[in-house]
Amino acid sequence: MITKRIIPCLDVRDGRVVKGVNFLGLSDVSSPVKLAKFYSSSGADELVFYDITASAEGRALFTDILTEVAATVFIPLTVGGGINSTEDFDRVLKCGADKVSVNSGALRDPSLILQAAKKYGNQCVVLSVDAKRVGGNFHVFAKGGREDTGQDVIEWVRRGVKNGAGEIVLNSIDTDGVKNGFDLEMLHAVCGAVDVPVIASGGAGCAAHFKELFHTLPKVDAGLAASIFHFGEVSIPELKQELAADGIRMRLLPQNDDFTQERETCHA
Amino acid sequence: MIAIIDYGVGNLFSLTCSLTAIGAEAAAVTSPEAVRSASKIILPGVGAFGDAAALLRKNGMDKLIIQAVESGTPLLGICLGMQLLFDYSLEYGRHEGLGLIHGSIQPIQNVIPPDCKVPHIGWNALQFPAGRPVSPLFQYISEGDFVYFVHSFSGMDCGESVIATSEYGVPLTAAVARENVFGVQFHPEKSGEVGLRILKAFCAL
């Protein structure tokens, strides 16, 4: 059976990873290429890059970096941030992205999902949703979580999937940064509403939170986190070993690394 | 030189880079000469079977590939490229394939349990058929190693050619082979080290 996925997320501004990253043994912790390699060799199942650059120059730097990452890291890459048109899809797919995540762009123009799904296939379109409780309902928030759109989350994800979104990333603003666990209630509601893979985001503080996520909500396909991985609070190989020992299906890397070492020596 | 057939279906960037990473000489090709002179051929592809098959035929690539295979050149089909090796597909109507692997391409929806989502997306383990020697394509990996899948259709009625399956409620065809023709449903260029080892094994054939 397919495994649950563990996905680190990297925010990139002007071609550098932002939010302090703190790894022992990495000389340049803000290099997206080095971090991507590190995570890939740690057993990350996929990588998400969010471009938080506002300028055109920053955009160009981002695509250069993405090209370099895709040329050296051979696991699925999802790219988000500043995706407002099918031209934006084209721009990042050409640089080696496998999936493209839309958020504000789809809120501004909901037809973007349908256009992109028709052109690149549903598997390529990820709908990322920032959601928060408002008066007993879950609302979709825009502008990085600053603006309440009034849109109901369940209706929005249903509509997105109907238009061709192949995956949902649900970021709970309520649990984000609190490190007290994923938003199981909100995730449960979304998993019940759509039949595409759902990726949980926001709230992970330790390995136990991933255990709780996958045991409580077997329909959730993946857990995404940023700072706990970047700061080394949770190590991906240890997390995956722990989850596997707890009966959760995980992709564990082959033990014999001769081939890898040989290859890295060749290209050193 | 390994020729990656570029017939306008999908992005060849990652595949080319992954072959470069293992030290192989590979290039995306569009010309008949490049296919004829290739030491090995890779047929990639994403998207719909009917469109891709039509594109292959439109520029005569189908015949060139079949001729190369008959003259002994190893061929590897990846994802939709693997599906194109089959006799036919039932994706949005019936479409003829290259007929290099006997069997058909059918929706996985028809065979998997209702609680399994479509498409089959993610990392799944490879199982080798019991009682048969392991394919040379897998000489550098082990049974149980994980590879990355994204597909809604799968090879069926191809029992004799199956060299690996993956469990998704039922065993799905993960890889096929017949003499010098190989096909993988998963994406070796997105399957980390395991994927690179499979590509390395193809290069070593």
Image (cartoon, coloured by chain):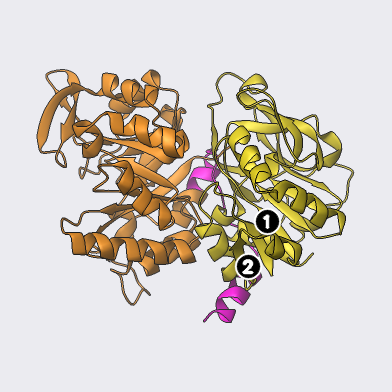
Name which quarter of the figure residue A119 lies in.
top left
* Residue tagged 1: B42
Few, some or many C-alpha atoms within 10 Å of disc 2 (few <14, some 14-19, many ≥20)?
Answer: many
Q: Kindly identify the amino acid type of the residue bearing the numbered disc 1.
A: Ile
Secondary structure beneath label 2: strand
Of the residues shown, which amino acid type is indicated by label 2?
A: Ala
Mark 2 and mark 1 in contact (Cβ < 8 Å)?
A: yes
The circle drawn on residue B176 is none
**Is residue B79 shown to the viewer in this render?**
no
Q: Is residue A72 above or below residue B176?
A: below
Is A260 a magenta residue?
yes
Q: Which chain is orange?
A: A
Q: Residue at x 35, y 53 (%)?
A: A91
Task: Give the chain letter at badge 2.
Answer: B
Q: The numbered mark 1 sits on a residue in which chain? A: B
What residue is shown at x 28% (from left), y 26% (from top)?
Answer: A186
Residue A205 rendering spot, x and y as whole percentages:
29, 46
* Residue B123: percent from left, percent from top: 56, 44
In percent of width and height, residue A129 lies at 26, 34
| Above or below, comparing residue B141 to residue A134 in the picture | below
Q: Is residue A104 above or below residue B194?
A: above
Tally the numbered discs: 2
- Of helix, strand and loop, which one carries label 1? strand
Chain shown yellow: that is B
Q: Please tell me which residue is depicted at 54% across the width and 79% down the height of the picture.
A: A267
Judge the density around disc 1: few (<14), some (14-19), many (≥20) Cα neighbours within 10 Å: many
Residue span colored magenta: A242-268
Query: From the viewer's perspective, is B176 left or right of A107?
Result: right
User: Does the rendering let one see residue B32?
Assistant: yes
The residue where tag 2 is placed is B26
Residue A266 in magenta? yes
